[in-house]
Image: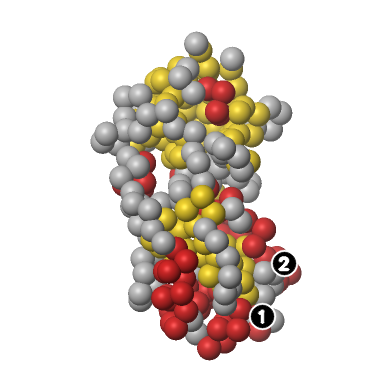
Amino acid sequence: MQYEGVLKKMQTELGSPIQYYLVFESDFLNINQVLDKELSIDFLKHQCLNCGNDRPIFRQGFCKSCFFEIPSAGDWIMRPELSTAHLDQEDRDLAYEKRVQLQPHIVYLANSSNVKVGVTRKTQVPTRWIDQGAHEAIEIVEVPNRYLAGITEVALKDHVGDKTNWRKMLTNNVDDENLVAWRNKLKQYIPEEASQYFIENNDETHLQFPVLQYPEKVKSLNLDKTPNYKGILKGIKGQYLIFEDNTVFNVRSNEGYYVGLTVTG
């Protein structure tokens, strides 16, 4: 089977295990069905997710000029505390920013390599947790806009991590944590503006990833350095493909790369 198209982050469907899909312009591939089969990845060109031109990808699937111009790549995406739509203040496109920022957001705890705090739109639960490779997660606060979620995350980062150790996550060298206890312990550090939105009674969500074999020591596939790769797919976790030879491929960090895929076996 052969497929061709520009990479975007894999779409997911909650299940036991989680189902993963690569979606191209005129076709899609259920990656779970490729497990234990040989997958070839051939880099063909770049294709910016915004302008569509064959230009080197700068960040988030965009070429450099698009990254610094389009509203969906504003600084508030990565730093929610910089959101200003609730003040009617524009960053790049106020209509877009209001549409994204002025909707319910969740501050959560996720355990992928360690317990970390994060922010996502409510509509992205549990997708955000899946993308991070978290095997357990819990909501702490549900607020009406991105700014309140951002300042809550900043306050909690003094008391819990905010980064995932992706190598540890991929080797599955992780411990189970009592996230309900973590949530209750962190309650006292929530800013006053967001304290009324604390979620008192909820349980952890547990996630099962389709992995047949975890790598012992991961080595990352870089398409710029290795434009043609072939290996036996052994698992999918977060946005990573895991191969039998310990190679891992981060689909999301390669958004905007136009590839050919061949499945054999």
Q: Can you give x and y, in whole percent of width and height, for residue 4 in the image?
A: 59, 25
Q: Is residue 31 left or right of residue 115?
A: right
Instruction: Classify mark 2: helix, strand or loop.
Output: helix
Q: Can you give x and y, in whole percent of width and height, for residue 244 in the image?
A: 35, 24
**Residue 230 can be seen, yes or no:** yes
- Comes first in the chain, label 2 or label 1: 1
Q: Is residue 251 left or right of residue 223?
A: right
Q: Can you give x and y, in whole percent of width and height, for residue 23 in the image?
A: 64, 34
Instruction: Name above or below for residue 175 compared with residue 83.
Output: above
Q: Residue at left 39%, top 21%?
A: 231
Label 2 CA crowd tier, 10 Å (few <14, some 14–19, many 20+): few
Instruction: Name above or below for residue 223 compared with residue 177.
Output: above
Q: Can you give x and y, in whole percent of width and height, for residue 72 in the image?
A: 61, 59
Instruction: Name above or below for residue 128 compared with residue 263.
Output: below
Task: Tell me the amino acid under the disc marked 1.
Answer: His
**For mark 1, what is the residue?**
86
Q: Residue at left 72%, top 67%?
A: 99
The answer for how far apart the CA atoms under marks 2 and 1 are is 11 Å
Q: Residue at left 36%, top 46%?
A: 169
| Residue nearer the viewer, 183 or 59 | 183
In the picture, the quarter occupied by the N terminus is: top right
Query: Residue 25's image quarter?
Result: top right
Query: What mark, if any, has residue 99 been given in the picture?
Result: 2
| Residue nearer the viewer, 36 or 257 | 36
Q: Residue at left 50%, top 85%?
A: 191
Instruction: Classify mark 1: helix, strand or loop.
Output: helix
